[in-house]
């Protein structure tokens, strides 16, 4: 009875393969029934296991139509109506047989002819692609779609005994119209047509949309859809209840071997932590296609044929083939492991199983889930392959760059025995792959020299839920400067007889937030990331960078027009990194504004994110709070002007634990110190900009308090050429412009000069170069 139930569900929920902008939409309910019945269905199918049949198992001979159809004949067809994205009934359309070949008939809806959506040139080319040739990108350019798919997938059902597939080109009734646009169904086939029943067209019939399909995807879009549907037509009659991820993957593989490329893989590559066996959103199309492509390249085309004919479903069918045929000496788990490596490494020169051979797929490279260039790193309780109704069969990557001698340690949670960790090392003319053990420390001594990048792939090769944690440290950060104003440990502040080491807005404060001011040192440093010490339950925050264009010392103009949405991990206290390396072009000119603010705003009224604070020694905070001043109105206030509790505890001696990481892009006088203080206790003379210079240069310094300074410029002989005596210097960053004139108003000559800043008894110097 359960087999009958599954078969009935396939009739009810699989009357057609539905497309939306050249992509399938499969029925989730159908899939869920299959998942719940999986164990019993597998047991029964093993009992009735068959070798590959001579003919498809679900084979019916319809009552023959004694009349012979010829070009120009007119016929009424029942067609499905897909308003609101689902089949809601049948319509009838009048169609004319416009082309008749040896292997196919092409019918065209009369309305589409009258609307001039289809012309003779397109019909001639379509018939050629179906029957004669598919172009140089095809696996068999001298064959048409029909013969290619018979060769690679199996026999085509001929239920109407005319040795042809019929194609109906029409405007499928869907949600598309020229005013509101909307989705459209690119094509489908209905197994009802192979039965003597109501609404059956009694033909081996495939339906293809032409409006707006020809406008959106062009003629190749229609050809691609035809290739997909011919494969599904074959597949359905070998195994009519195959799981959607196999059925979809093989149909998309059909478009590839017929020369129509692969689907855009970016949605999947942006997030590979997606259960292979679940078909849920657009990312799953490319996921399924790449997996079947990988199977074909690694195990051969005969394996795909066997997969289509195998009576078992999903991964069990793959496992069954691997165990049945002696020519395969690999397990399903090993295939999945290698596929995970291939989606990042993608280089068959390292090993044939670590990449794709298809030209179009050679550029594939998955994005990493976690990109680390600031250390130390601690992440806890990361899950892999967790999804409603199913778990496992997923993978994700962590990337480590910049530093000296990387040390890693990964931990698998209890019950996560199915996950594996793969270490990939990258350097100039160097790549290495090895599997590592959990709970064991690994040190990469060549990191920062021979090895520029380390990527760890965590792979869940089972249906079990899995989680993992990891830590990473380096001996010394390299290529980056961290700018900070904390010692790494939150400080305690007491107010209203309560001690705390973190700040939180509480409820009803969506839009409120926090920010820290950072000085940008010179043009050879580019902001690459922000670190925040916090505790969180995983609430979404809006991150942005602000400038101070009106020079009032407060944030105003945002750098990102749309804030970056960030989700901290669930934690009771750890560093959270916001990676900004992909925005380098937008951030490389921040130095021109001399300072900026980095911070986050709360998106929800229920605020459950706490931001750690640390004390400073100069009683001059660089932190700011965004406060709700009235209904839907907010204002930034410096910590220097804020206090807490009834005791009015001032916040001027506290800073939020925000750090900025700057990537070193050239020679800089800042040096390679691991950490630099945001608010130094002593005066700082920064490198002038520009340097070298010809007409003028800007001199920049930091003053720990309001005072006066002496600025002097000497030539290489030690002679003073310019001085700014008793120059007013406010607390914070100060500037002065030198226009290359001496104290007597005469221009100075090219050469090397010494810039000296005198602050009381403290003297700071920099070398500057004038080139005319």
Image: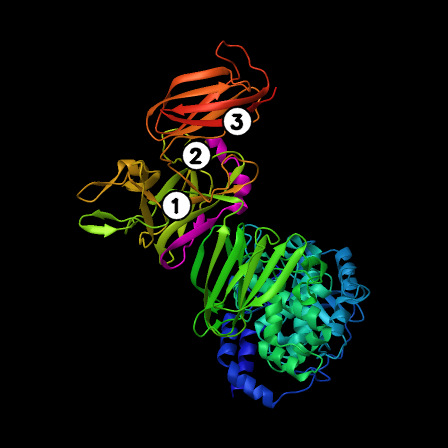
Q: Is 588 left, or right, of 291 in this rendering?
A: left
C-beta proximity under 8 Å, tags 3 and 2: no
Residue 307, given in percent of the width and then of the height, sits at 66, 77
Q: Is residue 172 magenta?
A: no
Residue 312, given in percent of the width and then of the height, sits at 60, 81
| Cα–Cα span, label 1 and label 3 | 32 Å
Q: Nearer the viewer, residue 61 or 373?
A: 373
Picture quarter with the C terminus: top right
User: Bounds of the magenta span?
Assistant: 564-593
Residue 111, given in percent of the width and then of the height, sits at 66, 59
Q: Nearer the viewer, residue 122 or 258?
A: 258
Where is mark 1, residue-wise? 658
Q: Is residue 578 magenta?
A: yes
Where is mark 2, residue-wise? 595
Q: Is residue 706 positioned above or below 454 on the image?
A: above
| Cα–Cα span, label 3 and label 2 | 23 Å
Quarter of the image for residue 454 reads bottom right
Where is mark 3, residue-wise? 767
Q: Residue at x 57, y 75 (%)?
A: 243
Quarter of the image for residue 139 reads bottom right
Q: Secondary structure at mark 1?
A: strand
Q: Secondary structure at mark 2?
A: strand
Sequence-first tag of 3 and 2 = 2
């Amino acid at each position: 009875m359960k087999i009958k139930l599954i078969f009935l569900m396939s009739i009810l929920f699989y009357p057609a393969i539905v497309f939306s902008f050249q992509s399938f939409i499969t029925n989730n309910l159908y899939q869920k029934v299959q998942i719940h019945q999986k164990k019993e269905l597998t047991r029964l199918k093993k009992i009735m296991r068959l070798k590959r049949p001579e003919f498809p198992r679900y084979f019916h001979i319809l009552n023959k139509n004694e009349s012979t159809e010829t070009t120009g004949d007119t016929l009424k067809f029942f067609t499905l109506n897909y308003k609101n994205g689902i089949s809601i009934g049948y319509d009838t359309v009048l169609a004319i047989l416009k082309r008749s070949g040896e292997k196919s008939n092409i019918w065209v809806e009369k309305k589409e002819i009258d609307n001039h959506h289809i012309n003779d040139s397109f019909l001639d080319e379509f018939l050629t692609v179906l029957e004669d040739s598919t172009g140089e990108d095809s696996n068999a350019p001298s064959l048409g779609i029909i013969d290619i798919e018979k060769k690679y997938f199996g026999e085509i059902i001929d239920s109407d005994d005319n040795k042809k597939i019929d194609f109906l080109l029409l405007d499928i009734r869907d949600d598309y119209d020229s005013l509101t646009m909307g989705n459209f169904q690119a094509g489908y086939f209905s197994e009802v047509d192979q039965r003597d029943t109501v609404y059956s067209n009694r033909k081996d019939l495939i339906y293809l949309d032409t409006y707006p399909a020809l406008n959106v995807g062009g003629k190749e879009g229609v050809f691609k859809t035809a290739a997909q549907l011919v494969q599904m037509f074959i597949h359905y009659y070998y195994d009519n209840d195959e799981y959607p991820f196999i059925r979809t993957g093989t149909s998309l593989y059909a478009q590839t071997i017929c020369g129509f490329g692969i689907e855009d893989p970016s949605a999947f590559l942006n997030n590979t932590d997606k259960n292979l066996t679940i078909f849920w959103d657009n990312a799953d199309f490319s996921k399924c296609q790449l997996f079947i492509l990988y199977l074909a390249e690694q195990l051969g085309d005969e394996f795909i044929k066997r997969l289509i004919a195998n009576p078992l479903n999903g991964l069990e069918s793959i496992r069954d083939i691997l165990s049945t045929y002696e020519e395969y000496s690999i397990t399903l788990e090993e295939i999945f492991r290698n596929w995970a490596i291939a989606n990042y490494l993608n280089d068959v020169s390292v090993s044939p199983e670590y990449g794709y051979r298809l030209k179009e797929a050679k550029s594939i490279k998955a994005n990493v889930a976690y990109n680390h260039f600031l250390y130390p790193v601690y992440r806890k309780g990361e899950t892999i392959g967790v999804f409603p109704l199913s778990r496992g069969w997923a993978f994700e990557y962590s990337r480590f760059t910049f530093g000296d001698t990387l040390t890693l340690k990964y931990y698998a949670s209890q019950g996560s025995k199915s996950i594996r960790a793969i270490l990939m090392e990258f350097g100039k003319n160097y790549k290495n792959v090895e599997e590592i053990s959990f709970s064991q420390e690994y040190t990469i001594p060549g990191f920062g020299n021979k090895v520029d990048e380390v990527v760890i792939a965590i792979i869940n090769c089972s249906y079990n839920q899995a989680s993992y944690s990891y830590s990473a440290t380096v001996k010394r950060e390299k290529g980056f400067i961290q700018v900070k104003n904390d010692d790494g440990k939150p400080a305690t502040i007491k107010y209203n007889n309560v001690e705390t080491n973190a700040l939180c807005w509480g409820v009803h404060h969506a839009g409120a937030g926090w920010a820290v001011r950072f000085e940008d040192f010179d043009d050879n440093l580019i902001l690459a990331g922000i670190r925040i010490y916090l505790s969180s339950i995983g609430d979404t925050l809006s991150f942005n960078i602000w400038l101070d264009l009106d020079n009032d010392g407060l944030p105003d103009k945002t750098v990102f027009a749309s804030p970056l949405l960030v989700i901290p991990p669930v934690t009771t206290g750890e560093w959270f990194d916001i990676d900004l390396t992909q925005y380098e072009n937008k951030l490389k000119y921040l130095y021109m504004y001399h300072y900026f603010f980095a911070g986050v705003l709360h998106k929800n009224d229920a605020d459950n994110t706490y931001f750690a604070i640390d004390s400073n020694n100069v009683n001059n905070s660089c932190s700011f709070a965004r406060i709700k001043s009235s209904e839907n109105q907010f204002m930034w206030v410096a910590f220097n002007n804020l206090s807490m509790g009834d005791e009015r505890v001032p916040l001027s001696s506290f800073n939020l634990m925000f750090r900025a990481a700057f990537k070193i892009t050239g020679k800089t006088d800042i040096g390679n110190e691991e950490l630099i203080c945001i608010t130094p206790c002593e005066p700082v003379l920064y490198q002038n900009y520009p340097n070298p210079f010809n007409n003028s240069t800007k001199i920049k310094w930091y003053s720990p308090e309001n005072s006066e300074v002496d600025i002097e410029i000497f030539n290489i002989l030690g002679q003073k050429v310019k001085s700014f005596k008793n120059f007013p210097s406010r607390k914070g960053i100060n500037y002065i412009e030198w226009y290359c004139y001496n104290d007597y108003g005469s221009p100075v000559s090219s050469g090397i000069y010494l810039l000296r800043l005198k602050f009381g008894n403290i003297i700071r110097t920099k070398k500057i170069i004038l080139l005319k």
